[in-house]
């Protein structure tokens, strides 16, 4: 097994978060293609679900969607990882001016017109 660790965000990456308003007691349905994505990515790295949601609720969601087997753990701690997959992130390219511009113009993919 490859020892690369990848942290994957739940909301907006694995679920249809962008279709509604945030509800701390309800996690929206799984995104189409997410299971196949995880199955393929799991061959390359150890996967960790990274979320600020209630960890028990997030774990139940994984079980209910039959994707729990792809994850080594569910965490709200930013553990050392090879990379993060998140819908609310900017990749730093070494240039602060470029990064500032990206911050000013940032919009999540599901809010783009």
Image (tube, rainbow, N blue to C red):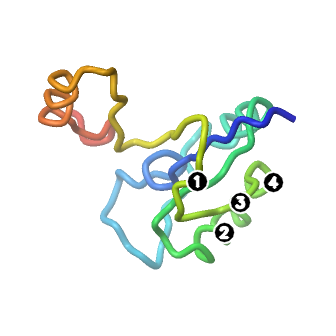
Name the residue tied to disc 1: 79
Name the disc covering residue 59, or none: 2
Relative side of 1 to 30, left or right: right
Q: Which residue is drawn at the image coordinates 81% and 54% (left, top)? A: 69
* Of pointers 1 and 2, the one earlier in the residue sequence: 2
Circles 4 and 2, Cβ within 8 Å, touching? The answer is no
Q: Which residue is drawn at the image coordinates 71% and 60% (left, top)? A: 73
Determine which quarter of the picture holds residue 72.
Answer: bottom right
Are there few (<14), some (14-19), or many (20+) residues within 10 Å of tag 4? Answer: few
Q: Return the x and y of residue 31 as percentages of the image width and height.
A: 54, 46
Are there few (<14), some (14-19), or many (20+) residues within 10 Å of tag 1? Answer: few
User: Is residue 39 positioned above or below 52 on the image?
Assistant: above
Relative side of 37 to 69, left or right: left
Name the residue tied to disc 3: 73
Say which of marks 1 and 3 sits in front: 1
Q: Mark 2: which secondary structure? A: helix
Name the residue tied to disc 4: 69
Q: Which is nearer the eye, 47 or 31?
A: 47
Relative side of 98 to 39, left or right: left
State the separation of the CA atoms marked 1 and 2.
18 Å
Q: Return the x and y of residue 113 as percentages of the image width and height.
A: 20, 33
Q: Which is nearer the eye, 18 or 55?
A: 55
Q: Mark 1: which secondary structure? A: loop
User: Is residue 94 positioned above or below 4 on the image?
Assistant: above
Are there few (<14), some (14-19), or many (20+) residues within 10 Å of tag 3? Answer: some
Say which of marks 4 and 3 sits in front: 3
């Amino acid at each position: 097994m490859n020892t690369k660790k990848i942290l994957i965000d739940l909301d907006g990456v694995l679920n249809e978060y962008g279709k509604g308003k945030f509800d701390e007691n309800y996690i929206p349905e799984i995104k189409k293609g997410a299971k196949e994505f995880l199955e393929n990515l799991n061959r390359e790295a150890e996967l960790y679900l990274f979320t600020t949601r209630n960890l028990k609720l997030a774990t139940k969601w994984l079980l209910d969607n039959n994707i729990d087997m792809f994850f080594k753990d569910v965490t709200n701690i930013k553990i050392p990882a090879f990379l993060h997959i998140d819908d609310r992130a900017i990749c730093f390219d070494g240039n602060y001016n470029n990064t500032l511009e990206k911050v000013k113009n940032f919009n999540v993919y599901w809010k783009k017109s």
